[in-house]
Each structure stands twice: as structure tokens, then as C-alpha cells.
Image (cartoon, rainbow, N blue to C red):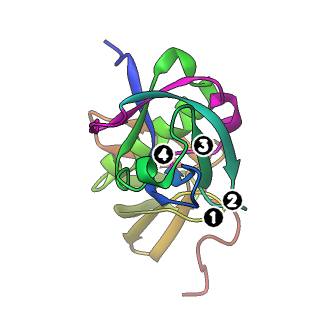
Amino acid sequence: MTNRFIQVGTIRKSHGLSGEVLAAFAGRTSLRDLEGKSVWITPPTDKVHGTIFEHIELLGDSLDAYVTFEGIDSLDYSSSLSRHRLICRREDVPLELIDEIEQKEYAPALLGYSVFSEAYGELGEVSEYLETKANDCLVVQGQYGEVLLPIIDEVILSIDEDARRIVVYVLPGLIDEDS
């Protein structure tokens, strides 16, 4: 059964005097579509629990954004919200954003999986999950040393959870063939 709610981000700190906060979101795809949607701040405080996203302003290429909420209009309210989670009804979150969030939640669970490529054979084992500005990556340790595999559809061809095995396509330049 699918959970009715999904965590979309975490408040980092208050920002300014009018209740704005700096929040780290779990994804950035369709994030502005959350404006006008209900959000729950957890754990709840004496001053606020449920509210509505008024405005979300992404900061550059990061997952951070300045956020304003309905009814939170002073530093007094926002200063107590650091490290609180932002949770929305799944039905209010764009599907693209849900996919991005669930991919980030799923990828660390791949630690220890064996990785196989048709061209190179056994590459090794997933040793780390790495977040980068471009694409999140799986770090594979094995006979080719450390190989970074971006988590994109062109590279990750299939995942067999029962066998704990990932089949990949290795993009040109990802493996140093001279070593």
C-alpha cells in the first residue's frame, strides 16, 4: 500500500523578518507546482503544524529554496522551525517530483549490489551513493577500480532485487581502459 503522504523537504533555517525560511527539498522537478498546496510541518510546534505553500523560489542549481507559508509572517514563527520536515499529500505532489524523491530514497538501498555490464562483465559492487549537481551516482568498486555510474535510464538498465544485481550500460569514458 502506498503511503498517503510524502516528505518533500526539510527546513534549514529562518530567513529574514517576514517568516520566510530556507528549505532543502528532496527534488527540484516541478517544485513550483507545490505553491498553493497544503503542507504539514513536522514535528508540529505550538504555533504551526498545517499551512499552505505561498511561494517557492529555487536557488540556482541546488535543491535549496526560499519558502513562504500562509500564516507564517514573522521571524517569531519561522525561527522555531529549523530541521522540521515538510510533508505533503501524495496527490498534491507532481508525479515527476515523486519519481525524483523516490529515486533518491531507493538508491542508497542498492549498497552491496553486484554490478554487471555486457561490455565489461562484472564491474564490482556498489560501495557508495553519491549526490552530485548533475546526476546522482552509484560508486562501484571492483576490478576497474572506482567507477561512477550516473543514475539515469540510459545507464541503469535493470535491477534484480532478489539477486541483488544491477545491469548497466557503461557510457564511454566512465572506465579507464588503459589501467
In the rendered image, which residue does mark 4 sit on?
A: 167
Residues tagged 4 and 2 counted as in contact (Cβ below 8 A): no
Residue 68 numbered tag:
3
Between label 3 and label 2, give the one nearer the viewer. 3
Between label 4 and label 3, give the one nearer the viewer. 3
Give coordinates of residue 103: x percent, y percent: 48, 40
On screen, residue 116 versus residue 109, left or right, reads right
Residue at left 47%, top 20%?
Answer: 90
* Magenta span of residues: 25-48
Residues tagged 4 and 3 counted as in contact (Cβ below 8 A): no
Determine whether the residue tagged by mark 1 lies in a helix, strand or loop. loop
Give coordinates of residue 79: x percent, y percent: 41, 56
Between label 4 and label 2, give the one nearer the viewer. 2
In the rendered image, which residue does mark 2 sit on?
A: 59
Residues tagged 1 and 2 counted as in contact (Cβ below 8 A): no
Amino acid type at circle 1 is Lys
Question: 10 Å neighbourhood of mark 3: few (<14), some, or many (≥20)?
Answer: many
The Cα atoms of the two marked residues, 1 and 2, are separated by: 13 Å
**Which numbered disc flags the more N-terminal residue, 4 or 3?**
3
In the rendered image, which residue does mark 1 sit on?
A: 133
Residue at left 44%, top 66%?
Answer: 139
